[in-house]
Amino acid sequence: MLILIDIALVIGAYVLGSISSAILVCRLMRLPDPRTLGSNNPGATNVLRIGGAKAKTAAAITLFGDSAKGLLPMLVAHALDVGPWTLAAVGLAAFIGHLYPVFFGFRGGKGVATALGVQFGLAWPIGACVAAVWLFVAKVLKISSASALVSMALAPVFVWLFWPELALFYMQLAITLLLFYRHRSNIRNLLSGREGKIGDGDVPPSTPS
């Protein structure tokens, strides 16, 4: 019975992660499909870029929705008092659901907000540390992708400091590596100085961000 509960939690986390907040928000607010404009990435940054007069509201709702996809499964798993390996599987499943959503042809976003939701759901000090690094880098560099990469690179360290459990460390390491993979074009643009800044209306061609 316990095994069935664990499996249901993991599957439920993936299904919830597969709900694209960006696409649904843009449809409900009569905005362009975020997969067709800007960076072609269904995430809050691109919604902010293409949303016009509704950009800030649409991006905020998208950010909240994507974060909740990571947070809620972790809270449920905590409430059921599952073991660390199940907790890790739930967090990773929610994150993978956002990256490769079953409802949208497995074409998802970059996963920063969902990863942050997982981290807050794991333990609020972990999420707070990652968020603080993101905000600091964003304040200094004003580049969303750089903020994501630096904060997520440090995330495994924060997980180990606050909850030194191998399963959770491996979960965060996997999330970080996947996030870097999804940001590979952003990394190329950062190295070449072509990456757009937060609030820019334009992005380099073929640059997801």
Image (tube, helix red, strand yellow):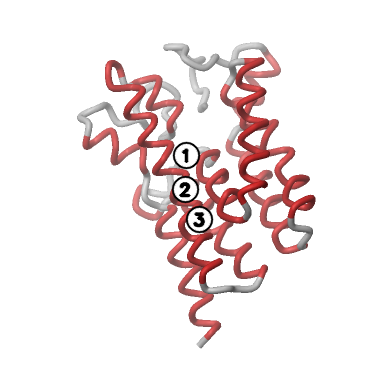
**Mark 2, secondary structure of its residue:** helix
Q: Which residue is mark 1?
A: 109
Q: Is residue 16 left or right of residue 25?
A: right
Q: Which residue is mark 2?
A: 98
Distance from disc 1 to disc 2, alpha carbons, whole Å, reads 6 Å
The circle drawn on residue 75 is: none
The answer to the question of whether label 1 and label 2 lie on touching residues, with beta carbons closer than 8 A, is: yes
Q: Position of residue 166 (x, y in %)?
A: 77, 62
Count the marks: 3
Q: Quadrant of residue 37?
A: top left
**Mark 3, secondary structure of its residue:** helix
Give the mark nearest the N terminus, 1 or 2. 2
The circle drawn on residue 94 is: 3
The answer to the question of whether label 3 and label 2 lie on touching residues, with beta carbons closer than 8 A, is: yes
Q: At label 1, which amino acid type do we have?
A: Gly
Q: Quadrant of residue 177?
A: top right
Name the residue at 44% across, 32% down. 41
Give the mark nearest the N terminus, 1 or 3. 3
Figure check: 102 above or below 49? below
Q: At label 3, which amino acid type do we have?
A: Ala
Q: Position of residue 13 (x, y in %)?
A: 47, 61
Q: At label 2, which amino acid type do we have?
A: His
Q: Is residue 38 left or right of residue 33?
A: right
